[in-house]
Image: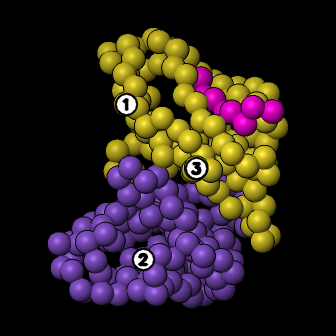
Chain colours: A yellow, B purple
């Protein structure tokens, strides 16, 4: 079993739709939760970072963490064609004194104009 | 300011040849990480540096892979006697400290023929 499970998609939605992206993780030791966005042929860029259960909002993006279910989500409101990218969830813990990050496989999102 | 840079952006090599991939982290970042991203595999941790030392090399796939960092800055990932299964995107990331958020470079796309 992978430490982080994420549906690779692809997910195709019309412009303006609400997008829901999800991951599950297996190890309750994970303390930090992140979402990265990766455009084609680019490196991942950090979108959201949280360390507690609950919601964190940043503009059109909301990250949700449920530690009891080991479930993390990213919601995108009023989706735009520029949101078309691969979204990677990531979890981490301090291991050996550093933040060891484990990534999901990524969900490819396409927003159709 | 300048982000993480990597060179070359693309590298095509023949099976059995050695390759060197370079990473220039964000100035002042003490921690540096190497990852590999293959189709259908997600990001795979290879090695991390704190300063010039590599406390965690656990992700290096075989002894054909090695990395060094000099002057607490530039890092080189070397793959000896490349194999076709080494074809992937090699991503470098850096962070201010080992407990901080990682910022990624654009990656080097390696193709082994």
Task: Let me know if residue A72 is in the magenta part.
Answer: yes
Cα distance between the residues tagged 1 and 2: 32 Å
Q: Position of residue A60 (x, y in %)?
A: 59, 21
Q: Which residue is mark 2?
A: B22
Neighbourhood count class around disc 1 (C-alpha, 10 Å): few under 14, some 14–19, many 20 upward = few
Tell me which label, 1 or 3, sits earlier in the chain: 3
Q: Is residue A107 shown in magenta? A: no
* Residue A56 image position (x, y, % from top left): 74, 29
Residue A2 appears in the picture as rendered: yes
Q: At x 29% / y 81%, what residue is drawn?
A: B82
Q: Which residue is mark 1?
A: A10
Asked if residue A81 can be seen in this view, the reply is: no
Mark 1–mark 3 Cα distance, whole angstroms, equals 22 Å
Tag shown at residue A1:
3
**Label 2 packing within 10 angstroms: few (<14), some (14-19), many (20+):** many
- Does residue B97 sit above or below A5 in this rendering? below
* Closer to the eye: label 1 or 3: 3
Instruction: Tell me, yes or no, whether dots 3 and 2 are on the same chain.
Output: no
Question: Closer to the camera: disc 1 or disc 2?
Answer: 1
Front residue of this view, candidates A36 and A1: A1
| Chain hosting mark 3 | A
Q: Chain of mark 1?
A: A
């Amino acid at each position: 079993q992978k430490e982080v499970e994420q549906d690779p998609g692809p997910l195709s939605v019309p412009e303006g739709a609400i997008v829901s992206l999800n991951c599950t993780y297996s190890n309750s030791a994970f303390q930090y939760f992140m979402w990265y966005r990766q455009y084609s042929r680019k490196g991942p860029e950090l979108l959201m970072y949280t360390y507690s259960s609950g919601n964190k909002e940043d503009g059109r993006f909301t990250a949700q963490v449920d530690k009891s279910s080991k479930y993390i989500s990213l919601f995108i409101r009023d989706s735009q064609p520029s949101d078309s990218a691969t979204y990677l969830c990531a979890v981490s813990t301090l291991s050996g004194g550093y933040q060891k990050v484990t990534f999901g496989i990524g969900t490819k999102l396409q927003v159709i104009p | 300011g300048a982000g993480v840079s990597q060179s070359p952006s693309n590298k095509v090599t023949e099976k059995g040849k050695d390759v060197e991939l370079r990473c220039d982290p964000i100035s002042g970042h003490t921690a540096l990480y190497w990852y590999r991203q293959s189709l259908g595999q997600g990001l795979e941790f290879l090695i991390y540096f704190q300063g010039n030392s590599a406390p965690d090399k656990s992700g290096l796939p075989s002894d054909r892979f090695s990395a060094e960092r000099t002057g607490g800055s530039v890092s080189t990932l070397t793959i000896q006697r490349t194999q076709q299964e080494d074809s992937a995107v090699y991503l470098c990331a850096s962070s201010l400290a080992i407990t901080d958020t990682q910022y990624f470079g654009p990656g080097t796309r390696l193709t082994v023929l």
